[in-house]
Image (cartoon, rainbow, N blue to C red):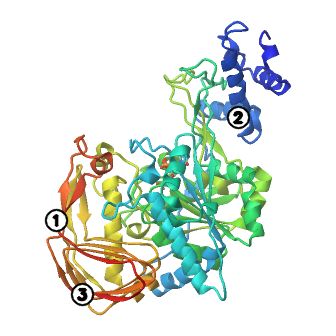
Amino acid sequence: QKNLHLLSPEQVELGKMLLDLGQGHLFEHWAEPGVDDHQKKGFFEQVARLNSSYPGGLASYVKTARVLLADSKAGKNPFDGFTPSVPIGESLTFGDDNFINFEEAGVKEARRAAFVLVAGGLGERLGYNGIKVALPAETTTGTCFLQHYIESILALQQASCELSQGHCKTEIPFVIMTSDDTHSRTIELLESNSYFGMQSSQVKLLKQEKVACLDDNDAKLAVDPQNKYRIQTKPHGHGDVHSLFYSSGLLNVWRGAGLRWVIFFQDTNGLLFKAIPAALGVSGKKEYHVNSLAVPRKAKEAIGGIARLTHSDGRTMVINVEYNQLDPLLRATGHPDGDVNCETGYSPFPGNINQLILELGPYIEELTKTGGAIKEFVNPKYKDASKTSFKSSTRLECMMQDYPKTLPPSARVGFTVMDTWLAYAPVKNNPEEAAKVPKGNPYHSATSGEMAIYQANSLILRKAGVQVADPVLQVFNGQEVEVWPRVTWKPKWGLTFAKIKSKVSGNSCITQRSTLAINGQHIILEDLSLDGALVIDAIDAAEVKVGGSVQNKGWILESVDYKDNSEPEVLRIRGFKFNKIEQLEGKYSEPGKFCLKP
Ligand code: UGB
């Protein structure tokens, strides 16, 4: 009351709303009028932001929180009444005719696609100091995740245009969802690298806001422990991407421009774009409204399981069941062993890798109904079994893969399973946590993420006819990994298997200790015998045939201890670095046809 003169009429309304919501405690410790007035105004600015960025405003947030907190206290199972079963989806085998056909169909569709990277997470589990998209996906070339994603989208754009008849001016839109934790550093990374070759107008950033923290079961909003004139906030989860889209107006712009697909993906998967063309082909041919990419899942692996849930009232849906919920759900529905592997050595439920392809028309229709609100959950850490108080404040959260939960039964929701080696190698765990992962389960670390790229490229070249040596086992940061030859290429060199096959001819071979970096578009490997390091840089207008016997001392892999502070963090978290002793380098900066033969 005493501070009313400071406030605009809108702020007075917000204040009344807080009181009506039983949030009077937020003002209890305020100083006398005339003291801290600037911070008091700041408080109302924050409340206005929290109110406008949440579908239905703070009133709706508090109301939902009270219901979810009561359910949690009562131990209510979110899947009450549902029985899980193993769903049927499309399963692809890399390189066979079916796969190649889907890839071609997907490349055609790509001209009508937009990509959305959710990159608002800080990656607490990884403990890296920077933003995750700035991390090198591999250290042979040092290409960071964001650069790799942008170059992949540009390669897809070019390949798609080449397939279309006539003049094609397509620019595939690329949206990045950021948060206060990642926004400015993402802009900085883009700007200081000229958007990695993309038109800056092609890239849009949408920033998610955090949500208010809750102190108790009555959804009392938490005062920030650092500042009594602020409400404490925490991230709301990647599900925010849908409401941000709804309010951005972008979807209608895209529909007007003739787009048909929106492809969502996460921040640190260096393999994803090897799977995207075929998966998009599946979406197109099967006319899926929702297509989730999946890989075989190891029981207890920290990725959700895709399940068909059938309710006792007859409703059914195909949906991700998050990794911490799958085990209790199975136990509660007649599977006393819970989340375990079946005779194949994998969980019978395909693993959700959270790369979603949505058809734009039905997506817009759905968001128009829901405003982009996604079913939320709350995960309070209680002090004791009475469940009356929390160890620390909690908040509502939501996940982007829960989007199908509100869809009508007529929606076509499918999924596409591909080999893990081709599609999924995220960087999420720090070295200590990764080393504790049970043997046989994936580490999801910077070490395994980089090694997976070499493995995938080696296996793809093998399939294309190159003799690639077997890997050796080595231990880095306490993790035993297969070390394949360090093969890398630019996405524009080969984004699909058909393209890669067209760049390889004759009899080529690569030894295990070799490094091959192909930084160019028109580079043909013909009767190449590589035993050492070979780096080829060529502009797009240069055509280079690479062959003959290349032998040198090469690049040696050396261990780096993650505790060794004299090494840069990006090397410490992967546990190795290259000692570049000797290599053959071919640089082609003029147009023309060239041969690189030692
Ligand atoms: N992210 C945001 O953009 N904003 C946020 O508020 C939070 C995250 P995590 P998680 O495929 O590996 C997911 O933390 O949530 C971004 C699926 O739920 O890496 O533990 C963040 O930047 C799970 O089913 O993953 O698990 C990152 O890009 C499984 O599929 C992305 O959201 C698992 O990912 C994911 O955030 C997986």
Quadrant location of the N terminus?
top right
Q: Secondary structure at mark 3?
A: loop
Of mark 3 and mark 1, the one earlier in the sequence is: 1
Local secondary structure at mark 2: helix
Q: Residues within 10 Å of mark 1 (few under 14, many from 20)?
A: few
Q: Say which residue label 2 marks.
A: 49
Within 10 Å of the Cα at label 3, are there few (<14), some (14-19), or many (20+) other Cα atoms? some
Q: Amino acid at mark 3?
A: Lys
Residue 82 rendering spot, x and y as whole percentages = 62, 52
For residue 300, side relative to residue 483 (left or right): right
Label 1: state its secondary structure: loop
Determine which quarter of the picture holds residue 6.
top right
At label 2, counting other C-alpha atoms closer than 10 Å, the crowd grade (few under 14, some 14-19, many 20 or more) is: some
Mark drawn on residue 597: 3
Q: CA distance from mark 2 to mark 1?
A: 55 Å
Residue sticking out furthest to the top:
32
Q: Which image quadrant for residue 518?
A: bottom left
Residue 237: x %, y % from top left: 58, 44
Q: Is residue 291 left or right of residue 4?
A: left
When the figure is inspected, residue 259 is found, relative to residue 429, above or below; the finding is: below
Query: Going from the N terminus, do you reach mark 2 or mark 1 first?
Result: 2
At a point 74% along the width and 38% down the height, the residue shown is: 52
Amino acid beneath label 2: Arg
Q: Position of residue 257 (x, y in %)?
A: 74, 70
Which residue is the extreme one toward the right?
A: 9
